[in-house]
């Protein structure tokens, strides 16, 4: 070998690369490739333009996914923006979004902004904004909601209250009277 593999590099910052070549990898004239600004690599030339990159929607914040066949019991879930339940969760939680898959189940107490139920929920559920129960979903217990959507086949049973805030805070809708 004429040039060592871990040879000295020039301090010049590369800015572009010729199509089909990568400096320092199999090129016969490595030192001239590195020193020529028109033949060098920069992070900007390697990265795809923003128009070519398909990005996932930003949900913002923290996300907890309880996968299939996972059982999470006896916990309090806090500071979680999105909870995705594909297994079994027995917990108390306050979150922004909860999604329960067809195989998922949640038992306990939850205060949520938006809940999408395809599996089972049982316990105390307060949905401040929108509760969506899909055709495979089953919700039982004490349910408070701001808006309610139930797909044909979805099940909802228990104490159902309109208005996500407790009656003592002056919300409209059904109110429970203790006697």
Image (spheres, rainbow, N blue to C red):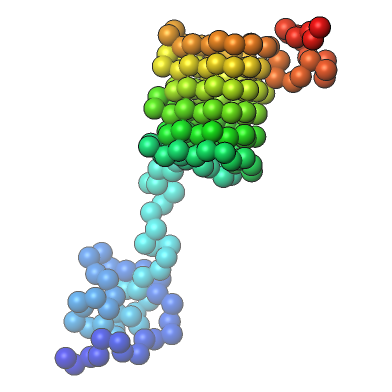
Q: Quadrant of the C terminus?
A: top right
The spot of residue 178 in percent (x, y) is: 79, 10
Task: Say which residue appears at 62% left-offset and 35% top-offset.
Answer: 93
Q: Which quarter of the picture shows residue 127?
A: top right
Vertical relation: 160 (above or below) 78: above
- Is residue 55 found left or right of 142 in the rendered image? left
- Is residue 47 found left or right of 97 in the rendered image? left
The spot of residue 142 in percent (x, y) is: 63, 17
Q: Quadrant of the N terminus?
A: bottom left
- Is residue 151 found left or right of 82 in the rendered image? left
Vertical relation: 137 (above or below) 175: below
The spot of residue 87 in percent (x, y) is: 43, 34
Task: Say which residue appears at 46% left-offset and 11% top-offset.
Answer: 154
The spot of residue 46 in percent (x, y) is: 37, 62
Vertical relation: 32 (above or below) 100: below
Task: Say which residue appears at 27% left-offset and 78% top-offset.
Answer: 24
State the residue in front, 103 or 4. Answer: 103
Q: Which quarter of the picture shows residue 30?
A: bottom left
Q: Taking the image as drawn, is residue 59 in sight?
A: no
State the residue in front, 179 or 89. Answer: 179
Task: Say which residue appears at 59% left-offset and 28% top-offset.
Answer: 108
Q: Taking the image as drawn, is residue 23 in sight?
A: yes
Which residue sits furthest left? Answer: 1
State the residue in front, 125 or 164. Answer: 125
- Is residue 127 found left or right of 135 in the rendered image? right
């Amino acid at each position: 070998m004429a040039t060592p593999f871990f040879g000295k590099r020039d301090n010049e910052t590369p800015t572009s690369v010729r199509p089909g070549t990568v400096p320092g990898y199999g090129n016969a004239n490595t030192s001239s490739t590195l020193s020529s600004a028109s033949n060098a690599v920069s992070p900007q030339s390697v990265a795809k333009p923003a128009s070519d990159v398909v990005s996932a929607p930003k949900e913002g914040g923290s996300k907890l996914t309880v996968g299939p066949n996972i059982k999470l019991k006896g916990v309090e879930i806090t500071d979680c923006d999105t909870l995705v339940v594909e297994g079994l969760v027995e917990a108390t939680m306050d979150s922004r979004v909860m999604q329960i898959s067809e195989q998922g189940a949640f038992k306990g107490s939850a205060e949520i902004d938006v809940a999408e139920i395809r599996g089972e929920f049982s316990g105390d559920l307060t949905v401040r904004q929108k509760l969506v129960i899909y055709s495979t979903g089953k919700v039982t217990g004490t349910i408070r909601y701001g808006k309610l959507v139930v797909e044909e086949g979805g099940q909802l049973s228990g104490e159902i209250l309109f208005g996500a805030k407790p009656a003592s805070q002056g919300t409209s809708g059904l109110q429970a009277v203790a006697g």
